Amino acid sequence: MRKLNGFWKHFITFMSVALVLFQIYTAGFGVFPDIVQRSVHLFFVLAMIYIRKPIKKGVAMDHVPIYDIICCILCMICTGYLITIYDKILWDPSQWISTADKIFAVLLVVLILEASRRAVGLTFPIMAIFFLFYAMRGQLFPGTWAHKNFTFNQVFWMLYHTTNGIWGQMVGLSAGMLAMFGIFGAVLSITGGSQTFIRIAQKLTGKATGGPGKVALIASGLFGMISGSAMANVVATGTFTIPMMKDEGYDKEWSAAISAVGSCGGQLMPPIMGSAAFIMAQLIGVPYMSIAKAALLPAILYYLGAFVAIHYISKRLGIKGRGVEAKLGKIELAIIFIPLGIFVGFLAMGYTVTKAAFWATIIGVATAAICYFIQKEADAVKKTGKLCMDVCTEGAGSILSMAGLLAGAQISIALISQTGFGVKLSSMIVSIGQGHLFPCLVLSMVVCFILGMGLPPTAAYVLAASILAPALITLGLPDLVAHLFVFYFSTIGAITPPVCAAVFLASGIADSNWLKTGFLSVLLAIPAFLVPFTFAYDQALMLNGGIADIAICTVTAVIGVFFMGISIAGYLKKDMNMIVRVIMFLGGVCMFTPSMAASAVGIVICVVSYILAGGFSKKTAAA
């Protein structure tokens, strides 16, 4: 982001306040018609992206060049013009009204793709250019990929005049639910969310073996639930926890890996999770709490595996707790947990995410203001005013990042749908797997990782859901299972080399070798790579089924995670032989297999390897 002063600083402040007030008003009192709502949203978002984000890093960081001013004005004209002709579109959507429509349609597509490039990189512009070519020159492609060409008018009319194009579901999510959630996240962040969660983690595990590592894991997980971004989470908590871990005896790579794994897992952990989970709720049309319920046990297993590994790594290194217990004031807890409780409570009562975030935001700001007055601060009014301004500024910033990637994704998704490319790709995946589920799951996992190389987890999920989930659903997986599968692998791409954004950031803070850090991050997060395959075959892991099935699945999975954690650490009462570690790890994997016979074999392998590792006394082992 540019560091602006003078007129442009005031301009961004005004636009941020206007955008946040617009989102709060529509969340609380009803949205405008789809095209109008989304046009106003992009009116603010695109204009601010061109003012705040330079054309590339290091260029014009303290002023706004003339070409960005022109782009900002064009964004306002293209989106504002559509609002003025909305009634004409409503009455006769099939016709181009004037030459201006065509000019503004092309300009807006170009402007969105450039804004998307500035927000998340080249992936969406490259994809959009390819699909534009594919739409207009489909007859040039071979075999099943060929189709009858769409004309210029057909393509850009669809993109500019309908809710199947630019103004489709992704921008709709950005203009409603995700914008409001971003504002709510800003309230929690500004009122001290990251520091409060760090103190809670210190209170829970600060004095235990490996206290600093466990504090980092728990704090990152707690804050990750509300930040919706592994990268933002690393910055918010890692800047404190990584130096703390290094000071207590963890090496640079382990410190960075623990922070990255904890930060990534926050997006998988209910009750709030990340923005991709809210998108999933809209895409498959189920209540958000159903997704949270399905994701609960897999997320617990993710953190349990990392927690066990950190515990035994810490025992091997001789790392104890700090011995200083963090103090948590009632007011500090109230400022964070009252709005969180309101948000979860509204979701549990069946309200939409948008409405829950609206009330949580209003009550969160009110709670903070009341607490300022309770503490009898002399500048309570001024502090409340600053809080509101900071919420507008930070909330608008989070909206820009999300809207930039979703608007870019929407163009590609619209063209994928218009050309039938998604259906053809799904058919190809099924045919490569010869109609068998497992090879299709493996192929889908690989595609998710490839998408994740150039995109943030939310953007990777959006694309994966449009091209991979239909193939898995064709093979018989329920919608929720298919989407949760691609959601998991899109999310953990943030810690999976070769392109692992959360690892890069954590390594930068720790000054570690990023490749080794990425390898250690994958080891710590091993359950996240196994869990999706397990619930694809056994939905008891998603708390779906009979009580006995869920209990058996839970117990076997917990045992498997426990032994995998020990094998990753390579230490029990003493350093473990590599062969024993591998055997124990394989036993843990068997415990994940949705088969009673495999679980029985797995528990035998785990117990034998535990004995070989010296986990029992000689008398117990003999018995």
Image (cartoon, rainbow, N blue to C red):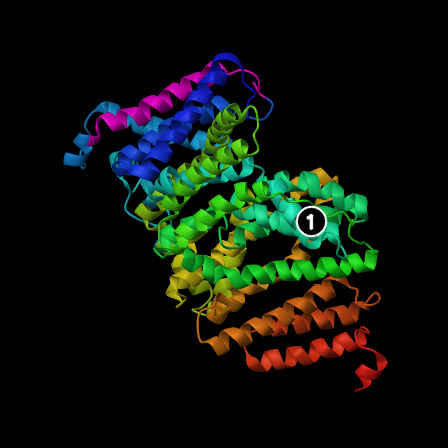
Q: Which residue appears farthest toward the left when viewing the image?
A: 91
One can see residue 143 in this view:
no
Q: Secondary structure at mark 1?
A: helix
> Is 363 situated above or below 436?
above
Image quarter hosting the C terminus? bottom right
For the stretch drawn in magenta, the main secondary structure is helix
The answer to which quarter of the image holds residue 83 is top left
Is residue 215 visible in the rendered image? The answer is yes
First to last magenta residue range: 59-86
Magenta stretch encompasses residue 587:
no
How would you rate the neighbour count of disc 1 (Cα within 10 Å): few for under 14, some for 14-19, many for 20 or more? many
The amino acid marked with disc number 1 is Gln
Q: Position of residue 493 (x, y in %)?
A: 57, 50
Residue displayed at 42% across by 57% down: 289
Q: Residue 563 location, x and y as percent?
A: 69, 69
Give the percent coordinates (x, y) of residue 470. 38, 58
Is residue 422 left or right of 306 when viewed as pictured?
left
